[in-house]
Image (cartoon, helix red, strand yellow):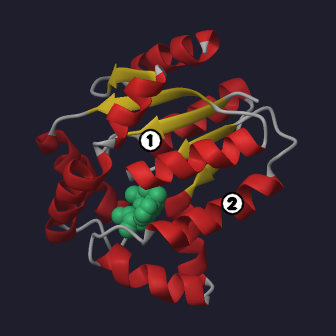
Amino acid sequence: MKNIVIFGPPGSGKGTQSDKIIDEFGLAHISTGDVLRAEIAKETDLGILAKKYIDDGQLVPDDVIIGMLAGKLDELKNTKGVIFDGFPRTTAQAVALKEMLNERETDVAAMISLEVNKEELIDRLLKRGKASGRSDDNLETIEKRINVYHKQTAPVIEFYKMEGTHYPVHGVGSVDDIFSDIAHIISKA
Ligand code: AMP
């Protein structure tokens, strides 16, 4: 399996680039944010719990996310590989992902880290909020999410640097140019 982590702050283009990776490489996709929003729409216990954190711009607790992901991985065991989008968001999640993949005799081939400056992130997320109506795409929550990214999520970069699989990509410019950098990395991974 060729498993890819697509990483970056909120608004860095993880979802947009995931769609293109799926088309080009035929990988399966797990977006923890999409899974949580589906649970919220179905009003499950998990959804009700997650909504409190999401609307406050905070991370859903690690044990909840890791348990949710383990179930999804088993559904995808016969695929060519998986794109992890929005996961891992803490070092504990990165360690858990490594363990879960190793148990299934696979690993992360590349962690692609999209680099976008804060002004651009805020601009993109405010625009997205107008179209998507996402409850967390308002200025106050966006700023909280970016702070949470720097405090809790950015340290994940160090984990993948140690693993030797961290690939930074400049995430500002045309979607196709950014994708061409990503495709080059995935082809070689
Ligand atoms: P996203 O759609 O990836 O921007 O995620 C939206 C929100 O879902 C985040 O701000 C978090 O509250 C929650 N979330 C998504 N993925 C995770 C994760 N891996 N760990 C913790 N919380 C998450």
Quarter of the rendering containing residue 41? bottom right
Q: Which residue is denoted by mark 2 in the rendering?
A: 70
Residue 137 versus residue 165: which sits nearer the camera? 165
Per the rendering, the mark at residue 104 is none
Q: Which residue lies furthest to the right in this view?
A: 78
How many neighbours does mark 1 have within 10 angstroms: few (below 14), some (14-19), or many (20 or more)? many
Left or right: 177, with 12 as reference point: right
- Please name the residue shown 67% across and 49% down the image: 100
Q: Which residue is denoted by mark 1 in the rendering?
A: 14
SS class of the residue under badge 1? helix
Q: Is mark 1 within 8 Å of ligand 1?
A: yes
SS class of the residue under badge 2? helix
- Please name the residue shown 53% across and 66% down the image: 65
Q: In which quarter of the image is the C terminus?
A: top right
How many neighbours does mark 2 have within 10 angstroms: few (below 14), some (14-19), or many (20 or more)? some
Quarter of the rendering containing residue 1? top right
Q: How far apart are marks 1 and 2 (CA)?
A: 21 Å
Q: Position of residue 171 (x, y in %)?
A: 32, 28
Q: Which amino acid does label 2 sit on?
A: Ala
